[in-house]
Amino acid sequence: MAQKFQKLRRTGERQERHEVRVLFPAEPLLHLMIMIEMDSIDESRCLLSLWRQDDPLEWPPARGGLYELSVDELKRRIDDVIVTSESKWSDQAISVVLEFVVARSLLRMSIMGLRKERGSGSPRPRVYDCALALRSLERMRSAHWHRF
């Protein structure tokens, strides 16, 4: 990246931007948890639930939405949910964690490949803007995994 700025003769501007940039603190955190369950009858359908923490000192957050949709619509709906959450959080200078709790069949879904603002001309990977966590729904529902 530094080479690209040097080629464009923008190293001074880059340095200025880094000097005035305000980093978000590591604590407290805002959480957005997205849970995806597969439909027990139709494998092409799923249920998306979300919990959004709007106050970093309030835990647990209230359940904020429940959507029944096709698996093909999943990435677009996830993007919509995250953009809505970011709009709600826009006045807070707090770090964010996106947690995904997904059915085993969806664990291969690349959350690292999720893009920000998919509708724009230049979508950006979400992993650049916030921490991402991926959890197995079946594991969370199994008591024998909770001992440790």
Image (tube, grey):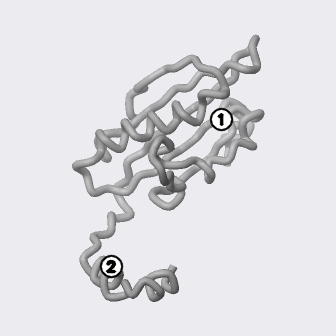
Q: Secondary structure at mark 2?
A: helix
> What residue is shown at x 65% (from left), y 25% (from top)?
37
Nearer mark to the viewer, of 2 and 1: 2
Q: Secondary structure at mark 1?
A: strand
Quarter of the view holding residue 93: bottom left
Please indicate whether residue 118 sits to the left or right of residue 18 in the image. right
Q: Residue furthest front?
A: 8
Where is residue 107 shown, x and y percent of the image?
A: 72, 41
In the picture, the disc for residue 102 is 1
Where is residue 39 shown, x and y percent of the image?
A: 69, 17
Q: Amino acid at mark 2?
A: His
| Among the two numbered marks 2 and 1 on one chain, the one whose residue lies closer to the N terminus | 2
> What residue is shown at x 70% (from left), y 32% (from top)?
103
Quarter of the view holding residue 69: top right
Residues under labels 2 and 1: Cα distance?
37 Å
Compared to 25, does 61 lie above or below? above
Residue that mark 2 sits on: 18
- Residue placed most toward the observer, 36 or 19: 19
In the picture, the disc for residue 1 is none
Quarter of the view holding residue 139: top right
Please tell me how crowded label 2 is: few (under 14), some (14-19), or many (20+) other residues with Cα within 10 Å: few
Please indicate whether residue 129 sits to the left or right of residue 90 in the image. right
Please indicate whether residue 60 sits to the left or right of residue 72 in the image. left
Q: Amino acid at mark 1?
A: Val
> What residue is shown at x 54% (from left), y 49% (from top)?
115
Where is residue 20 shown, x and y percent of the image?
A: 24, 77
- Residue placed most toward the observer, 146 or 110: 110
Please indicate whether residue 38 sits to the left or right of residue 96 in the image. right
> What residue is shown at x 33% (from left), y 65% (from top)?
25
Please tell me how crowded label 1 is: few (under 14), some (14-19), or many (20+) other residues with Cα within 10 Å: many
For the residues labelled 2 and 1, say whether their Cβ atoms are less than 8 Å apart: no
